[in-house]
Amino acid sequence: MSLIRSTNTNTPAAPATAAVGAGLSAGLTLLLAIGAGLSVASLYYSQPMLGMLGDDIGASPQHIGLVPTLTLLGYALGILFTAPLGDRHDRRQLILVKLGLLVLSLLGAALAPSLHALLAASLAMGVAASMAQDIVPAAATLAPEARRGRIVGTVMTGLLLGILLSRVVAGFTAEHLGWRAVFGGAALATALLGVALWRYLPHFKPSSTLGYGPLLGSLFSLVRQHGALRRAALAQGLLAVGFSAVWSTLAIWLHGEPFHLGASAAGAFGLAGAAGALAAPLVGRLADRHGPHAITLLGAGIAALSFAAMAATPALPRDLQLAWLVFTVLAFDLGFQAALVSHQTLIYGIDPAARSRLNAVLFVAMFAGMALGAALGSQLLAWGGWLAVGLLATAASLLALLVRAWPAARAVSRQRSV
């Protein structure tokens, strides 16, 4: 039975061609959510294992911090140079090719004999994992306009749960089976996902006839033409700096003084973040009802307050610190995800024929911010401890809030002056 709501009777071996706004069955929506989550999870498996990886490979905290940095940088590069192809070519083919490359890079990480080999595999893993940003526009294309925010929110729940639960799974597996088993198991799971996507994912008609060069060049044209896109990309990128600075250093901090916790304990913090991720479909409904701009303001404000509270953790009594960390992790993940889903809902309405490119701009900015946050976070943790990391995250989130609030404040000022 087809997972697309259609009367097409094509066999599963020749999946139907999707129509814009054709609608998604619950089964296909779930498969896309799993695909987005499992692919993007590859970016975060290393984070709760950084203390263990550093000890095993003999790398300093600064050097081992390059593993998540290069993975996130690879993701940004993959989005920039390949995601726009989704407007020019069949997204189904693009997703399946990247999935095969992701399996190979995960196997490369599992077998890496040295830090340099692991870094190379991490960069390739990031590039291939950009298939997540082909899956989300695919869902937006299939979704009816009236339910687009809700469906994008549901797929984003899968993506965000992949981000957060990957840390839990990786930490537990590494603690009991070793870090190589994490990457090997991920390669197997991704290969099984590939079979399901090959079986059920429909073909997509290209929405652009631009060649590759003009297609990439059109990214800059879209940025110049649409102020809403510029604000969304800048605000989400700033929020990502704080998000990544915290997540890329939390395991290292917990591994040392004063906690001395292992990889599984560090990964368990992903459960708190996962609770926030479950709110993504609700955020999508609120964006459909009240408009995405208001929800981006709310999300950025929650993130800024949460990061500020998290920065104060070392000043609390020792027996309260872990509980306070759990609470603030849940809160800042909720704020970050609310802003992200709302930003996606906002940009997908700008130009339906350019959704892959619009999505590429947003996520290049976001993961460039994540790469910057990972790099700055490891340096600040070594220099000023957890307080310095928290202050960086707070400052970046306040700037994001300013970016979102400034146009509205200017509009009110103009109205009063008339």
Image: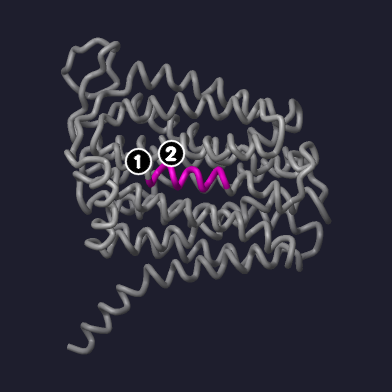
Q: Residues within 10 Å of mark 1 (few under 14, many from 20)?
A: many
Q: Does 282 sit above or below residue 205? A: below
Mark 1, residue position = 83
Q: Which residues are magenta?
A: 70-80
Question: How many numbered marks have been drawn onto this rendered protein structure?
Answer: 2
Whole-angstrom CA distance, mark 2 to mark 1, is 7 Å
Residue at 71%, 53% in the rendered image: 62
Q: Does 203 sit above or below residue 161? A: above
Q: Identify which amino acid the numbered label 1 is placed on.
A: Ala
Q: Are marks 2 and 1 in contact (CB under 8 Å)?
A: yes
Residue 78 colored magenta?
yes
Residue 303 colored magenta?
no
Question: Closer to the N terminus: mark 2 or mark 1?
Answer: 1
Mark 2, residue position = 130
Badge number at residue 308: none
The quadrant of the rendering that contains the N terminus is top left
